[in-house]
Amino acid sequence: MTEDPALEGESGLWSGEELDLDAYLARIGYDARRDGDVAADLRTLTALHRAHVAAIPFENLDVALGRNIPLDLKSLQAKLVDRRRGGYCYEQNSLFAAVLERIGFQVAGRGARNRSRGATLPPITHALLVVTVGGEEWLADVGFGWQGPLEPVPLRDGARVDQSGWTFGITVEDEGIHVLRSLRPEGWTDLYAFSPQSLYPGDFLVMNHYSSSHPLSRFLGQVVVQRPGADVRASLLRRRLSTLHVDGTTGERSVGVPELSESLRVEFGIELDDEERAGLERVHAAGA
């Protein structure tokens, strides 16, 4: 029996052959003349990861508007690249997987359980990537919002990396569970945990369906927009706009309905059309 090469991760799994790579690089501000030609190496992976999270915000606005969230590459390019919008983890990491596959990286999906909200035991709903470079695995995640890494993190027990003053680490627990952690002024805190099992685009579709439609999903009925900046991280959750600076200082202010559209534009670079503006203002008012 002949194996399907796509299932082995050799080609085509993430539809990288359909990607307009030049348009994506322009979207994230990557200039080959300045930043170097892209290649399947760690330098490229790091540079693309950092540029992506800086340029494309994490946001659930289409979910809040009750829209379908397609994950096919054509739709992802139209939204995140051409329309210069953002997206949440399934959209962001599906697009990034296609980019990496197009360049020649070996990419695999993973599903994680969020631990950033305390002692609750939520379902596995976060999608991330593992990229193999020179025989070493790296966690790549451009879709975890304001708490996520700026750059790839080496996927080995005890790894610790500093990224512009933000420190991340990896620990391995029983059953081979990997945990991404963040060092805060009060100490280490777990962000999420995941097993070494590979996930595929179809698995992302199932997780996406839950997060975009299930009544218990935290993405329904409220505005969630975030950005993990190198100097300051920002999160708009309902009416609270929170900021966290690299020195540990924090800020918070309220964003009412009249300020919503301008805050999305100024703080996150998101431009709304009239229909989106009106719909999100209704959601924002109801979710106050």
Image (tube, helix red, strand yellow):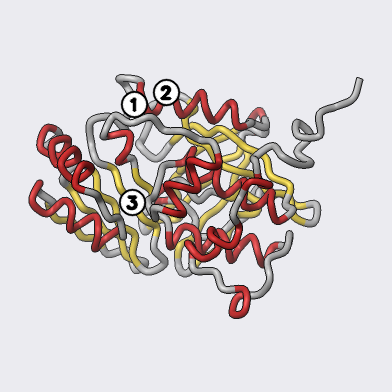
Residue at (55% x, 63% y) in the render: 25
Locate residue 262: give its quadrant: bottom left
* Mark nearer the N terminus (1 vs 3): 1
Q: Mark 1 sits on what residue?
A: 217
Q: Residue type at mark 2?
A: Tyr
Q: Are marks 2 and 1 in contact (CB under 8 Å)?
A: yes
Left or right, 265 with respect to 202, comes to left
Frontmost residue, 66 versus 191: 66
Name the disc covering residue 226, or none: 3
Frontmost residue, 236 versus 24: 24
Figure check: 91 above or below 85: above
What's the distance in space between the residues labelled 3 and 2, CA to CA?
Answer: 21 Å
Mark 3: which secondary structure?
strand
Residue at (19% x, 40% y) in the render: 280
Locate residue 54: give its quadrant: bottom left
Mark 2: which secondary structure?
helix
Residue at (24% x, 49% y) in the render: 273
Q: Mark 2 sits on what residue?
A: 210
* Mark nearer the N terminus (2 vs 1): 2
Q: Position of residue 18 (x, y in %)?
A: 63, 46
